[in-house]
Amino acid sequence: MAEMTGRKVLAITVGAFGVIIAVNLLMAFKAISTFPGLEVDNPYVASQTFDVERASQQALGWTLVADYDEAAREISLRFTGADGRPAAVSALDVLVGRTTEASDDRQPEFVLRDGAFRAPQDLARGKWMLRVEATSPSGTAFRQRLDLFVED
């Protein structure tokens, strides 16, 4: 066994810290490149109208239920009004993606069929996020973020 010298201890210490720093830099790069962390461009401006938009959305009385049919590979969205009947939706925009990574984001085209908005989508196993933006005939915006779990 070779003698432990000061140079060897220094090389081991520098090597160990070099590996730690390299891994930290790699993890930081991956975290920033896969998810930017921004929900809105300017949070202050978005906060100025938040209470008014929330009150108008609550006044609609809508309930949204999302479902994924794994056999048919189809997402369905059911909007229900305060009276329990299907809500009248004049415009619909949906973003489907992972909660932690923007590379899987997609915007499928939904079609109203059998009282639900449906879109074919081949979703892999795991947790998915639906960011739904709908508009009522009066122009009131309805926004909701839902989690969808695919067992497959």
Image: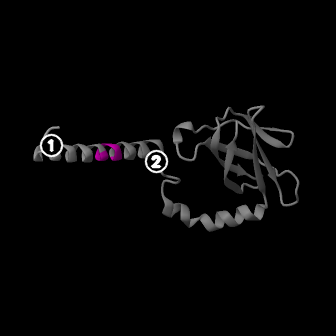
Front-most of residues 18 and 88: 18
SS at badge 2: loop
Q: Residue at x 66, y 44 (%)?
A: 94
Q: Quadrant of the N terminus?
A: top left
Q: Which residue is mark 2?
A: 36
Query: How many callouts does the rendering have?
Result: 2
Name of the residue lying farthest toward the front: 1
Q: Dot 1 surroundings within 10 Å: few (below 14), some, or many (20 or more)? A: few
Which percent across, then down, holds residue 69?
A: 77, 37
Residue 22 included in the magenta stretch of the image:
yes
Q: Residue at x 50, y 60 (%)?
A: 43
Which percent across, then down, holds residue 132?
A: 67, 48
* Amino acid type, residue under disc 1 in the picture: Lys
Left or right: 83 in relation to 2:
right
Q: Mark 2 near mark 1, Cβ–Cβ under 8 Å?
A: no
Where on the picture, by quarter, is residue 27?
top left
Q: Residue at x 65, y 67 (%)?
A: 52
Give the number of the disc on residue 70.
none
Left or right: 111 in relation to 133:
right
Q: Which residue is mark 1?
A: 8
| Camera-nearest label, 2 or 1 | 1
Left or right: 113 in relation to 31:
right
Q: Dot 2 surroundings within 10 Å: few (below 14), some, or many (20 or more)? A: few
Which percent across, then down, holds residue 66?
A: 75, 47
Q: Residue at x 67, y 54 (%)?
A: 143
SS at badge 1: helix
Q: Which residues are magenta?
A: 20-24
Separation (CA) of disc 2 from disc 1: 42 Å
11 w.r.t. 57: above or below: above
* Amino acid type, residue under disc 2 in the picture: Pro
Residue 4 included in the magenta stretch of the image:
no
Per the picture, the main secondary structure of the magenta-coloured stretch is: helix
